[in-house]
Amino acid sequence: MKKNKRLYLILCNFDGYIHVYATNTNKVQNFRCSNKCYCIAANDTQLFIGTDNNQLQVRSFDGNAIKSLLDGTQPVSALCLNESCLFIGTMHDSSF
């Protein structure tokens, strides 16, 4: 078992707010990403946020700066993250 393992509870709202709760410190980071947030995925250091304005935002856990931004043709409605790939689902049959 790893020492000092960080565990987070991450919530996204339709109003664009992301809430990151660190379970080991009881601290909450709140930040706004967009008008609406449809889905979220996380790895050890980053949050992947699907928004209603056809964007995939990649942020750090504190939400300070957008590390990366990917524009698509449809709102991102599903995200699946594994060790080496990020799968993006949209609301309609089209490529992101």
Image: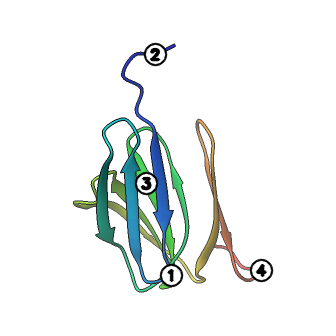
The local secondary structure at tag 1 comes to loop
Tell me what residue is drawn at x 40 percent, y 67 percent.
Answer: 18
Q: Are marks 4 and 2 in contact (CB under 8 Å)?
A: no
Q: Earlier in the sequence, mark 2 or mark 1?
A: 2
Q: Amino acid at mark 2?
A: Lys
Within-10-Å neighbours for mark 4: few <14, some 14–19, many 20+: few
Q: Amino acid at mark 1?
A: Phe
Q: Earlier in the sequence, mark 3 or mark 2?
A: 2
Q: Which circle, 1 or 4, is nearer the viewer? A: 1
Q: Earlier in the sequence, mark 3 or mark 4?
A: 3
Tell me what residue is drawn at x 50 percent, y 81 percent.
Answer: 14
Q: Which circle, 3 or 4, is nearer the viewer? A: 3
Q: Choose between 30 and 91: the one closer to the eye.
A: 30
Distance, label 4 to label 2, CA atoms, is 42 Å
Within-10-Å neighbours for mark 1: few <14, some 14–19, many 20+: some
Q: Earlier in the sequence, mark 4 or mark 2?
A: 2
Q: Which residue is mark 2?
A: 2
Say above or below: 25 vs 11: above
Give the side of residue 94 with respect to residue 71, left or right: right
Q: Earlier in the sequence, mark 3 or mark 1?
A: 1
Q: Are marks 3 and 1 in contact (CB under 8 Å)?
A: no
Q: Which residue is mark 1?
A: 14
Q: Which residue is mark 4?
A: 93
Q: Which circle, 4 or 2, is nearer the viewer? A: 2
Q: Which residue is mark 3?
A: 47
- State the image quarter where residue 34 is shown: bottom left
Q: Choose between 11 and 40: the one closer to the eye.
A: 11
Instruction: Identify the image quadrant of the C terminus.
Output: bottom right
Give how far across and how far down residue 48 sits, in percent: 47, 58
Give the side of residue 80 with respect to residue 27, left or right: right
